[in-house]
Image: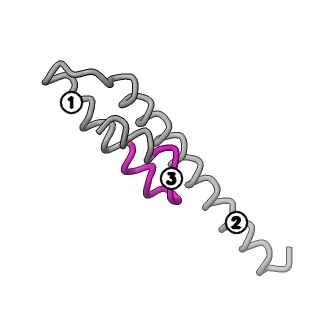
């Protein structure tokens, strides 16, 4: 699950993969803690990359909305 989190974070689909990465990474961390398994670094990496790509997707979306508003207003 930690590997899936990291992959979703890297291959984000305009925020959807990022959200999946954060959720999977969080679930993986809980399982790792409960079961004493390995992969903690991968899970944390997935959460971090997912959060960064989610923020980037939000910022790009806002910029596109603002840019289209200026274009429609003749500015």
State the mark number for residue 66: 2
Snapshot quadrant of residue 6:
top left
Q: Secondary structure at mark 1?
A: helix
Q: Residue at x 46, y 42 (%)?
A: 50
Residue that badge 1 annotates: 30
Q: Secondary structure at mark 3?
A: loop
Q: Main secondary structure of the magenta part?
A: helix
Instruction: Characterize the local packing of mark 2: few (<14), some (14-19) or many (20 or more) Cα atoms within 10 angstroms.
Output: few
Q: CA distance from mark 1 to mark 3?
A: 23 Å
- Does label 1 or label 3 sit earlier along the sequence? 3
Instruction: Characterize the local packing of mark 3: few (<14), some (14-19) or many (20 or more) Cα atoms within 10 angstroms.
Output: some
Indicate the position of residue 27 as horizontal and vertical percent values. Answer: 24, 38
- Does label 2 or label 1 sit earlier along the sequence? 1
Residue 59 vs 29, above or below: the answer is below
Q: Residue at x 39, y 44 (%)?
A: 21
Residue that badge 3 annotates: 12
Point out the image quarter for the C terminus.
bottom right
Left/right placement of residue 61 relative to residue 54 reads right
The residues colored magenta run 9-21
Residue 25, magenta (yes or no): no
């Amino acid at each position: 699950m930690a590997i899936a989190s990291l992959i979703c974070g890297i291959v984000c689909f305009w925020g959807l993969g990022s959200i999946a990465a954060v959720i999977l990474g969080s679930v993986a961390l809980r399982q790792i803690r409960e079961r004493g398994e390995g992969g903690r670094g991968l899970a944390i990496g997935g959460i971090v990359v997912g959060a960064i790509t989610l923020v980037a997707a939000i910022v790009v979306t806002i910029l596109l909305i603002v840019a289209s508003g200026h274009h429609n207003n003749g500015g």
